[in-house]
């Protein structure tokens, strides 16, 4: 998986507090910072992944300093462009930073048509990620089933071993009894041997 795809996956899954802590080198975010972020996400109706993209972009723009004005500006860009996912958000920010003239509107932000031209490719990427996730789940399920089958086989072997040990013990007892009986018969024969000879 490329670094770009890994970034998309992380932004889609990490909670805001963990993302801020990670980007700040382990320092916990303040309650004020979290309040600002929650307020912007709520007003702009941004989901977790897209809000994380906003934070990521704003921090890069301001040398890793979290400023409300930068967060508001970044969130407004995405709201205006109507982005639908993290991949589109990162594309908007990248083109906005580079100021590509072919995809910029009069205000310098990427145009909606420029972004949505990438829609089918982004949907293909999302489809591949979903399929990879399903494949991983199927593989894990197969391994779990095989694990359960191995456990059952081991239990069956243990049961057979116990039966073998029990039968072996019973055979030993039976042979002991037979040997004892032969010893008794042999002694009896020796005892009566002289009388048979005399007669």
Image: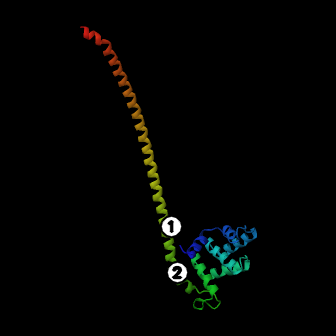
Label 2 crowd bin: few (<14), some (14–19), many (20+), radius 10 Å: some
Q: Which residue is drawn at 32% across and 15% down?
A: 190
Residue that protrudes farthest toward the top in the picture? 199
Q: In this view, does 98 lie above or below 196?
A: below
Q: What secondary structure is found at the residue carrying circle 1?
A: helix
Give the image location of residue 85, x and y in percent: 57, 75
Q: In which quarter of the image is residue 115?
A: bottom right
Q: Earlier in the sequence, mark 2 or mark 1?
A: 2
Q: Quadrant of the C terminus?
A: top left
Q: Which mark is residue 133?
A: 1
Q: Are marks 2 and 1 in contact (CB under 8 Å)?
A: no
Q: What secondary structure is found at the residue carrying circle 2?
A: helix
20 vs 156, left or right, is right
Label 1 crowd bin: few (<14), some (14–19), many (20+), radius 10 Å: few
Q: Is residue 198 visible?
A: yes
From the viewer's side, name the closer residue of 136 and 75: 136
Q: Residue at x 39, y 30 (%)?
A: 172
From the viewer's side, name the closer residue of 106 and 12: 12
């Amino acid at each position: 998986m490329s670094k770009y795809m890994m970034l998309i996956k992380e932004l889609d899954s990490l909670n805001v507090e963990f993302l801020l802590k990670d980007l700040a080198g382990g320092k916990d975010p303040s309650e004020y910072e979290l309040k600002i972020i929650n307020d912007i996400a709520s007003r702009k109706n941004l989901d977790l992944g897209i809000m994380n993209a906003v934070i990521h972009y704003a921090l890069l723009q301001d040398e890793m300093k979290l400023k409300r004005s930068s967060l508001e500006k970044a969130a407004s860009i995405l709201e205006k462009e109507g982005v639908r996912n993290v991949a589109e958000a990162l594309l908007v920010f990248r083109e906005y930073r580079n100021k590509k003239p072919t995809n910029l509107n009069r205000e310098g932000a990427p145009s909606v048509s420029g972004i949505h031209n990438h829609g089918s490719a982004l949907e293909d990427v999302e489809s591949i990620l979903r399929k990879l996730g399903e494949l991983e789940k199927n593989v894990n399920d197969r391994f779990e089933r095989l694990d359960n089958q191995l456990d059952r086989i081991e239990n069956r072997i243990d049961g057979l071993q116990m039966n073998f040990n029990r039968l072996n013990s019973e055979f030993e007892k039976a042979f002991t009894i037979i040997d004892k009986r032969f010893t008794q018969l042999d002694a009896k024969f020796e005892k009566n041997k002289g009388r048979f000879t005399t007669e």
